[in-house]
Image: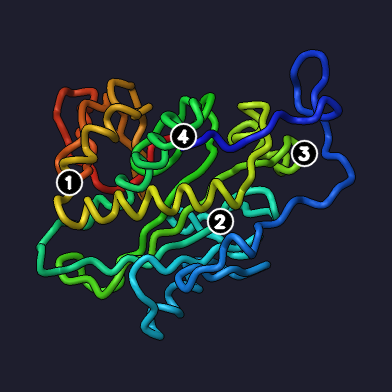
């Protein structure tokens, strides 16, 4: 697969390499001609692409139907947090997954599958050292460039369908991020010095994910467990786990076959964790 990107204009970079303010131009929108597909639904501004896919699923939309938007007004991440989704700069999309429940595959690690596959894609295709922070954050240079969120509609062992939402910071400049986010978030453009063709990038990522999901729903998490561990920023680190009502400090030892974090607390006890977040 080819690398998709072009060097930032010199006007946007000072002598130190620091990103300057945005030029007075409109962001390039996704190319509708190249998005023509019966399974891709394009929107300018939406509440949330996850909500769009849930509505389409209720109408019988097929497996891998995808909603992509230039902007989300109510994008959400884990734990109900809002996701900053400015117009024409990132990739904000959701995919409908209809697994064959007769395979009896444990689908709960699907979010980790998505994160691991995305990190691997950016490393292998674009030579960007993206890492995964448990369970689903994508980091570049220690800052967040993206995340995933999966909603299971039904019960885990007999789901009606799944909705996987993905947010990726692509061409944002520093000025595009609110002040409080600039220390924690970044984009591919800021870190690589390239602008990216978002349409080509979206289509390549969609194809990559479809292949991965087919394998996951056939063979389960084992093919992806090693991949997630390979690109992990978490394992081997001293971390703090936070959840409603408490925190725990310890060392992240390993990832279970179900995608759970094995955390050794300060007393030496090992906990199998599938809740909370690392702070």
Mark 1 vs 2, N-terminal side: 2
Near mark 1 (Cα within 10 A), the count class, few <14, some 14-19 or many ≥20, is some
Q: Quadrant of residue 9?
A: top right
Q: Residues within 10 Å of mark 3 (few under 14, many from 20)?
A: few
Asked whether 272 or 193 is in front, the reply is 193
Are there few (<14), some (14-19), or many (20+) residues within 10 Å of tag 4? some
Q: Quadrant of residue 172?
A: top right
Looking at the rendered image, the disc whose residue lies closer to the viewer, 3 or 2, is 2
Q: CA distance from mark 4 to mark 3?
A: 24 Å
Query: Does label 4 or label 3 sit earlier along the sequence?
Result: 4
- Residue 161 image position (x, y, % from top left): 29, 71
* Separation (CA) of disc 3 from disc 2: 19 Å
- Sequence-wise first label, 3 or 2: 2
SS at circle 3: helix
> Label 2: which residue?
92
SS for callout 4: helix
Q: Which residue is mark 3?
A: 175
Residue carrying label 4:
122
Q: Position of residue 121 (x, y in %)?
A: 42, 37
Gap in Å between the C-alphas at discs 4 and 2?
Answer: 17 Å
* Residue receiving disc 1: 258
Q: Say above or below: 1 vs 108.
A: above
Q: Earlier in the sequence, mark 1 or mark 3?
A: 3
**Mark 2: few/some/many CA within 10 Å (<14, 14-19, 20+):** many
Mark 4 or 3, closer to the camera: 4
């Amino acid at each position: 697969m080819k690398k998709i990107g072009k060097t930032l204009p010199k006007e946007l970079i000072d002598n130190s390499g620091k990103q300057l303010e945005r030029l007075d131009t409109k962001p390039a929108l996704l190319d509708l001609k190249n998005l023509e597909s019966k399974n891709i639904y394009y929107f300018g501004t939406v509440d949330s692409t996850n909500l769009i896919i849930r509505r389409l699923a209720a109408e019988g939309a097929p497996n891998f139907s995808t909603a992509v938007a230039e902007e989300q007004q109510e994008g959400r991440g884990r734990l109900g947090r809002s996701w900053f989704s400015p117009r024409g700069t990132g990739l904000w999309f959701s995919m409908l997954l209809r697994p064959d429940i007769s395979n009896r595959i444990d689908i709960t690690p699907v979010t980790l599958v998505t994160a691991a596959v995305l990190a691997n894609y950016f490393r292998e295709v674009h030579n960007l050292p993206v890492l995964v922070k448990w369970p689903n954050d994508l980091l570049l240079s220690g800052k967040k460039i993206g995340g995933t969120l999966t909603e299971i509609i039904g019960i885990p062992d007999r789901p009606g369908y799944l909705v996987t939402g993905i947010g990726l910071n692509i061409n944002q400049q520093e000025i595009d991020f609110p002040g409080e986010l600039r220390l924690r978030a970044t984009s591919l453009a800021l870190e690589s010095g390239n602008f990216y063709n978002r349409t080509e990038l979206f289509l390549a990522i969609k194809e990559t994910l479809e292949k991965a999901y087919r394998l996951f729903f056939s063979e389960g998490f084992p093919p992806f467990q090693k991949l997630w561990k390979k690109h992990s920023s978490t394992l081997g680190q001293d971390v703090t786990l936070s959840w409603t009502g408490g925190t725990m400090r310890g060392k992240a030892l390993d990832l279970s076959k179900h995608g759970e974090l094995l955390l050794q607390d300060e007393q030496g006890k090992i906990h199998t964790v599938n809740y909370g977040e690392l702070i």
